Image: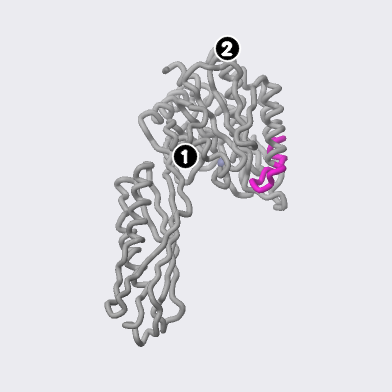
Amino acid sequence: MQLAELKSWIDPQRAEIEQFIRELVEINTYTANTAGVDHAMDVFSTFATQKGLSVERVNERHRLLKLPGATRRPRILLIAHMDTVFPPDGDFLHYEPLPDGFVRGPGTGDIKGGLVMGLYAMLATRELHADLDVQLIVSADEETGSPTIRDWYTQGHVGADYAIGLEPGFPQGELSATVPLGVVYERRGYGAIHFTVTGKSAHSGTPHLGLSAIEAMAQRIIRIHGLNAPERGISTNVGIMSGGISPNTVAGSAEAVASFRFERLEDGLATQQAIEAIICESYVTNPDLKLSDSATCKLESFLPPMERTPESQKIIEAVLAEAQRLGHPVVPIARGGGSDANFTSAAGTPSICGMGAPTHGIHTTEEMIYLPMLFERIELLTATLYRLYQAQ
Ligand SMILES: [Zn+2]
């Protein structure tokens, strides 16, 4: 098959592609519904095997699809997941075709539409050149931060040269036949640190007998906020704080959560260190009692960024060049929030995201995809993969 024949290869399979998305959407795969997720994984694996792909298990529950015998670099890892955010006892459970090619349903866009797109892009690349090494990882618990596969990603995954996330392509306006879709070149990382400050409580009429944990907390907050550096993509914020027991008491303790965001992994690690150093310092002293405030802290979460690098920019440029050739409106965008592409990026693999289904209302009961554009995007995804091979 030639690249120009891609559309005529995909078009006769539209009904089959839609039917398979429907079948997966009808299986409830709320993350905590592990039986449902595992069942959908089996259905997906059986289908992929019938299509001639090989399927391996990763850390028990996750699945890795490969094209047998394909070894030609660059190796490209497509990233999707099977779980969704919709519980089985909720009221958003079914695949519902709407007029004009729209389909509403749980996980249609995040991410079962994208998952099926990835599968067909693999099949299409095999038609273009049997040796192209495209693989597809399907996580079972992405919606809760991929706790059981995160290490697999960050410790090198399959050693891919590029990674492409199939999270939804975000329409830059109302989802329609002509709206440009965002392709994500950067996701900022995120961290949160919980900390507790200890002073000494006393009656407010005799403050010299105590040491105010709230005053000591205030000193820390001012300094943590002082780490904000928007020009470098770093932001810090103490978004929750509490302390004290009454207006008439010098507060004996206070607690807070500081969060921070960053574009580069090294900035994230440095910001974490800086916040922890601020927290561990003492600021208020009661000389009579020979007492200073103290604090403890705990890192509650840390998500590495999906970094924009010259190498990841090559993927974006391949997408844009093919989008222009095919006449698909696409816009590069930065987004907050994380996906598994954050973890492949942390492993040093150039990564982008948002190459999945055109989606409206992600994570809400209005979640829907637009099928005509989804079929076109399989063509765009495949053409992008092929272009990355040609550029090697
Ligand atoms: Zn997702």
Image x and y of residue 325, in percent: 46, 21
Earlier residue among tags 1 and 2:
2
The image quarter in which residue 214 lies:
bottom left
Ligand 1 lies in which image quarter?
top right
Q: Is residue 119 above or below residue 289?
A: above
* Up/down of 195 relative to 150, above or below: below
Vertical order, 120 against 333 (above or below)? above
Q: Which residue is mark 2?
A: 1
Q: Secondary structure at mark 1?
A: helix
In the picture, measured across the screen, residue 224 lies left or right of residue 158, that is left
Q: Which residue is mark 1?
A: 342
Whether ligand 1 has any atom under 8 Å from the Cβ at mark 1 is answered as no
The image quadrant where one finds the N terminus is: top right
Kindly identify the amino acid type of the residue bearing the numbered disc 2.
Answer: Met
What span is colored magenta in the figure?
22-36
Residue 350: image location, x then y, percent: 43, 31
Residue 175 placement (x, y as % from top left): 55, 40
Q: Secondary structure at mark 2?
A: loop
Image quadrant in which you'd find residue 223: bottom left
CA separation, marks 1 and 2? 34 Å
| Front of the two marks 1 and 2 | 1
In the image shown, does 113 or 122 lie closer to the viewer? 122
Q: Residue at x 38, y 28 (%)?
A: 311
244 sits to left or right of 39: left
Which one is nearer the viewer's eye here, 204 or 27? 204
Residue 210 on the magenta segment: no
Residue extending farthest to the left is 287
